[in-house]
Amino acid sequence: MTAHPKVPLSLLVGLSTTLREPVLHAMVDATTVAVVVDQDELPGRGVLSWRVLDTSGPIDAGEFTVNDDCGACELIESLLPLLETLVARRHWDHVVLAAPPAMEARPLAAALVTTLPEVAVDTVTCVVDAVLLVEQLSGDELLDERGLALGPPDRRNVAELTARQIEYADVCVLANAHRSNAPERLHNLLVHLNPRTTVVAADPGGVPTGAVARTGLFDYHAAEAWAGELASSDRVQPSGDGVTTVLWRSTRPMHPARLNDALEDIVDGVVRSRGVVWLANRPTQRVRWESAGYSASLGTLGEWSDTEHLAECTVVATGMGLDPARLQAILDACLLTESELAAMNWQDLEDPFAGVL
């Protein structure tokens, strides 16, 4: 039996369904079938609506029920059989999946790569609004406050979602660029957040001016490496046009209380930061550092002994109008001093992160 070639799939994400619509149309040609998932009915009825279409028009429609558990998990679990059925028909040579606005590309792509061998993820495209991009990346508004959460447990904020969508994208479509005073600066910001991405402008009607599907750009391992626990330091972009990325490192541990007290100062002027830190009172534990807008979070990543690295702190931070010397000084002040290193019983330190780590 001759094996069928894998069907390429292009994944479309982005907060604004209005701005995504002309991009979706540009992705769908005579050989393409599209699955579009909408979350308008999620807050009121607890369902995600989906529709299937091609150039001839609507083909099918339905709903996924979202309970009080992980909405993203339930979406993935419900989508995979639908995609599998469409691919099995062999009517189309290309699939487009338009995710709901609050969905990140990373878990979807991972599920497709690991559980749907008939499909090859080809391109991840993210649509961003040039008018609102800086605001979306800089605030602390929760998705739930905008009626966009994927279920009750979803406590992500808009900045976190926006950053993660950009960081995983092969192509970023900069919509509404004609309404921005500094489109080149926004282009530069997108490349700082994701050096892998290709930035494509959209015309005043929202139609992309470059390729947004079937580009062959998706590389699962490269995408995971960049969007993982720490952005690759060798791909940090040089400062320019008001956008700065700072790489901060230290082989000394951080004083947990001083770090906790400095959180607001660290994220001031930073739109996105990621890294791994070493807390003095947790000497064996690797701790994930992440911030988006005015929100910062820490999480556990396992033990230092499980890696090839000695314990250290590494943070990559990007901002607009960011003062690198100020940020580095704030982070340096969180480290144990030489006298503390020599005399202090580290594990007796107050632990302000006991509730989250």
Image: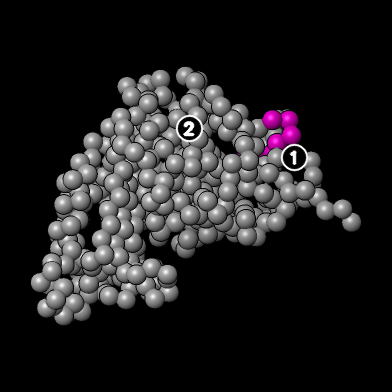
253 to the left or right of 208:
left
For label 1, the residue is 93
Q: Is residue 41 visible?
A: no
* Mark 1 and mark 2: Cα distance apart in space: 25 Å
Measured along the vertical axis of the image, is residue 151 above or below residue 246?
below
Q: Is residue 63 visible?
A: yes
So how many labels did they put on this image?
A: 2
- Of marks 1 and 2, the one in the foreground: 2
Residue at x-position 62% and y-position 55%: 113
For label 2, the residue is 199
- Can you give x and y, in whole percent of width and height, for residue 333 in the image? 14, 58
Q: Secondary structure at mark 2?
A: strand
> Foreground residue, 295 or 16?
295
- Quadrant where the N terminus lies? bottom right
- Quadrant where the C terminus lies? bottom left
Amino acid type, callout 2: Val
Residue 216 location, quadrant = top right
Earlier residue among tags 1 and 2 = 1
Q: Secondary structure at mark 1?
A: loop
Main secondary-structure element of the magenta-colored stretch? strand
> Foreground residue, 338 or 57?
338
* Mark 1 crowd level (few <14, some 14–19, many ≥20, 10 Å Cα): some
135 to the left or right of 219:
left
Measured along the vertical axis of the image, is residue 157 above or below residue 30?
below
Boundaries of the magenta span: 29-36
- Can you give x and y, in whole percent of width and height, for residue 151 in the image? 44, 56
Residue 229 location, quadrant = bottom left
